[in-house]
Amino acid sequence: SGAFIDYMHRTQLLAQKGKFVADVLYYYGDHVPNVFPFKYSDPAGVLPGFDYDVTDETVFLQLKIKDGKIAVPGGVEYRVLVLPDHKILSMAVLEKVDELLQQGARVIGYKPENLVSLVGDEKEQKRFHELADKIWGIEPSEKGEKKYGEGHVAWGVTAREYFLSKGVPADFNVEESNSKTDYDYIHYTIGESEVYFVSNQTTKRQKIHCQFRISGFQPELWDALTGEIREAKAFAQKDGLITVPLTLEPYGALFVV
């Protein structure tokens, strides 16, 4: 229908203009088979409240450190890099992890135990294990954290647990719910504006209080279905967070700007 097409146009316009914001970059590995599932599989352990992006080896090897954050080509930046739990990496990726840590990255992941394939000779296998020992230690405990170069490596902890332990609040939080699946959000930066697309994933009309990790703004509510824009009349700001009450129809969504 025309209304649905208008809705898609509005949402796509904001998404195309915006720069995606996520706290975590998840490296989903270079082993075979290599298929990434849906968002709620949450391999990085970020949900609820935080978001993540995924990368393959090609992009991984191009990562840089910018102002203490992990940056990909194109300018998107992340607070933390998360490695897969299967403990299998290529030599090139392990060397890149070493480089990023030396420059100040924060990395979450268990010590790798195996090369991605058996193509490496004994010399390369030895170099792989020596570098892993250097980064994580020879016999690391099940859970820990270690300073390495200018950065830190942690293991045995999810990204969400790691952030909360460091005093980093969730980017998006629903006060009435701790569900990973009832609500979803996407955060974009457009110029000086922060844009959150918040959606109700349930079959019921929901009245909720949403916290956003921004401050100093007069929030506006943009209805992508009707095009209506209105100021949020009731909201609160405290400790770098804005809390906005929202009413979402079943499977409904709003932009909070």
Image (tube, rainbow, N blue to C red):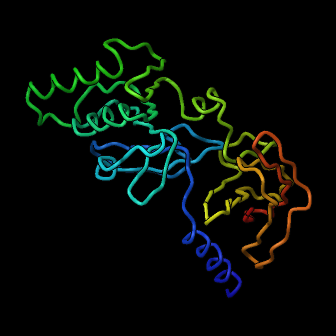
x and y percent of residue 133 in the render?
A: 29, 18
x and y percent of residue 238 in the render?
A: 82, 42
Quadrant location of the C terminus in the rendered image:
bottom right
The residue depicted at 61 percent of the width and 41 percent of the height is 47
Q: Is residue 248 left or right of residue 21?
A: right
**Residue 185 occupies quadrant:** bottom right
In this view, 234 is above or below 147: below
x and y percent of residue 79 in the render?
A: 52, 41
x and y percent of residue 76 in the render?
A: 48, 55
Q: Is residue 180 left or right of residue 157?
A: right
Q: For the view shown, which residue lies furthest in the front direction?
A: 67
Q: For the view shown, which residue lies furthest in the bottom direction?
A: 2
Q: Is residue 157 left or right of residue 128?
A: right
The residue lying toward the viewer, choosing from 35 and 253, is 253
Quadrant location of the N terminus in the rendered image:
bottom right
**Residue 189 occupies quadrant:** bottom right
Q: For the view shown, which residue lies furthest in the right direction?
A: 234
**Residue 217 occupies quadrant:** bottom right
The residue depicted at 73 percent of the width and 49 percent of the height is 212
The residue depicted at 33 percent of the width and 35 percent of the height is 97
State the count of labels: 0
Q: Is residue 245 left or right of residue 4?
A: right
The residue lying toward the viewer, choosing from 14 and 74, is 74
The residue depicted at 72 percent of the width and 65 percent of the height is 255
